[in-house]
Amino acid sequence: KAGVTQTPRYLIKTRGQQVTLSCSPISGHRSVSWYQQTPGQGLQFLFEYFSETQRNKGNFPGRFSGRQFSNSRSEMNVSTLELGDSALYLCASRQTWTLSFRAFNEKLFFGSGTQLSVL
Amino acid sequence: GNSVTQMEGPVTLSEEAFLTINCTYTATGYPSLFWYVQYPGEGLQLLLKATKADDKGSNKGFEATYRKETTSFHLEKGSVQVSDSAVYFCALTSSGTYKYIFGTGTRLKVLA
């Protein structure tokens, strides 16, 4: 079974531009979440999608948005890029067949990330 | 809100040394606790987990015990190898939110 695939692997943009990152989850996984990883802050939760609906959102400005398609693939968009947006963006999927009480402790499967550099 | 605090790194050890990486948490209710590991150039992968108080998670020689009285989930390994060099993240989830909260990560470097 293929793992979580993120594209592109590296991106270089300039301030003010926008960027779209893509994530294909493991086949059969319905939940996709996004994280920003920086050396000083560790992993910061951006948002999670389940069956095309945003289920959770972290404390990021509205410039960060996302969506999920019917095949569970997800995209993340950042508009009006700032220097501080430079980071590794990680996508993770989990199966979450139901919104059951115990589903919250399912393990996450991570992609290798997209390294975004804003100049 | 929920939070996770990890000891700052980097931690540098010689091969076969004993490892402890401290992790404490703040959470309401009964969270599940996890350790994830990130090898260079890769995403995170689950190392071990514990879902209730006094549970011990273990994998690849690593262990961590869910201590509700001290709100801790310290990672230990009796004898580290060079291949254990990576960044280790402590994390928690709680029912109802489906949201993972991660610590800032602790970099481990093991020298031959």
Image (cartoon, helix red, strand yellow):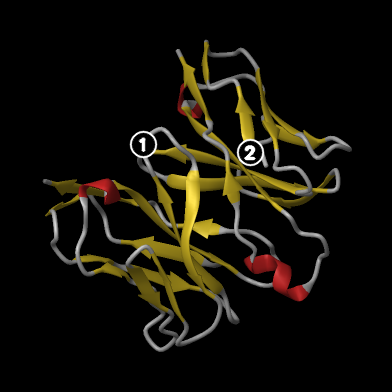
On screen, residue B66 above or below A28: below
Which amino acid type is shown beneath numbered disc 2?
A: Val
Residue A71 rendering spot, x and y as whole percentages: 85, 37
Q: Which residue is mark 1?
A: B40
Quarter-wise, where is residue B6 in the image? bottom left
Q: CA distance from mark 1 to mark 2?
A: 17 Å
Q: Report in which chain the residue with disc 1 lies.
A: B
Q: Secondary structure at mark 1?
A: loop
Is B64 situated above or below A89?
A: below
Please give the name of the residue rendered at 53% of the width and 59% of the height, measured from the top-left corner.
B101
Question: How crowded is the residue under tag 2: few (<14 C-alpha within 10 Å), some, or many (20+)?
Answer: many
Whether residue A106 is visible: yes
Residue A22 spot, x, y in % from top left: 68, 27
Residue A53: % across, % down: 84, 47
Q: Residue furthest front?
A: A1
Label 2: element kind: loop
Q: Which residue type does callout 1 highlight? A: Pro
